Structure formats: C-alpha cells, structure tokens
Amino acid sequence: MSRSCDVCGRGPAKTTTRSHSNQKTLAKNYINLQSRKFDGQQIKICTSCIRSVKKYAVAA
C-alpha cells in the first residue's frame, strides 16, 4: 500500500529526530492522506490537494 498522493505524487519526508545527547534517529513524516471519490474512482489524496481541488472547482 503506497503512502503517496495520487494527484501530486508527494510522499513521506525523511527526517531525523534528535535526542538530548544529539544522537540522530531516522524517522518518516507521513502526509495526511484521505480517501475520496472523484469521477467515480476511489483515490488517495492529500489534504492540500483537496483544498486546491475545491478552490479551483468553485472558481471554474
């Protein structure tokens, strides 16, 4: 199961968490994915793309 947006293709970001001793630990920050239906198809879309779709659908 992929954790990337079907619209923009954005995926998880690689970050490092730092302890008090300044030791690095790799971590992943996942994006906020939601399941939505567009044109009869179920897609996984990030919340920033949902806002953009709503914004430009109203303007059009």
Image: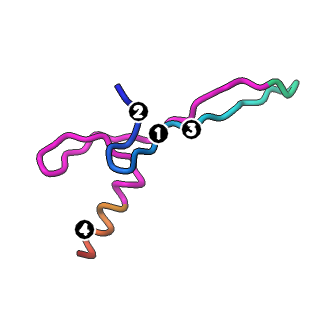
* Of labels 4 and 2, the one closer to you: 2
Name the residue located 11 percent from the left edge and 46 percent from the top edge.
Answer: 40
Name the kind of residue labelled 1 in the image.
Answer: Gly
Residue bearing the label numbered 4: 57
Q: Secondary structure at mark 2?
A: loop
User: Between disc 4 and disc 1, whose residue precedes?
Assistant: 1
Name the side, left or right, on which 53 lies relative to 19: left
- Indicate which disc residue 40 carries: none
Task: Determine crowd level at label 2: few under 14, some 14-19, many 20+ residues with C-alpha closer than 10 A.
Answer: some
Q: CA distance from mark 3 to mark 4?
A: 29 Å
- Majority secondary structure of magenta residues: strand
* Mark 4 touches mark 1? (CB < 8 Å): no
Q: 29 left or right of 17? A: left
- In the image, residue 29 lies in the stretch drawn in magenta: yes
Give how far across and how far down residue 34 sits, in percent. Answer: 33, 41
Q: What residue is disc 2 on?
A: 3
Check disc 3 and report the residue beneath it: 13
Q: Which residue is mark 1?
A: 11
Q: Earlier in the sequence, mark 3 or mark 2?
A: 2
Magenta part of the chain: 24-51
SS under mark 4: helix
Question: Which quarter of the rendering shows the N terminus?
Answer: top left
Left or right: residue 21 compared with residue 31: right
Kind of residue sitting beneath label 3: Ala
The mark nearer the N terminus, 3 or 4, is: 3
- Camera-side residue: 6 or 59? 6
Residue at x 33% of width, y 45% of height: 45
Residue in the image at 37% along x and 54% along y: 49
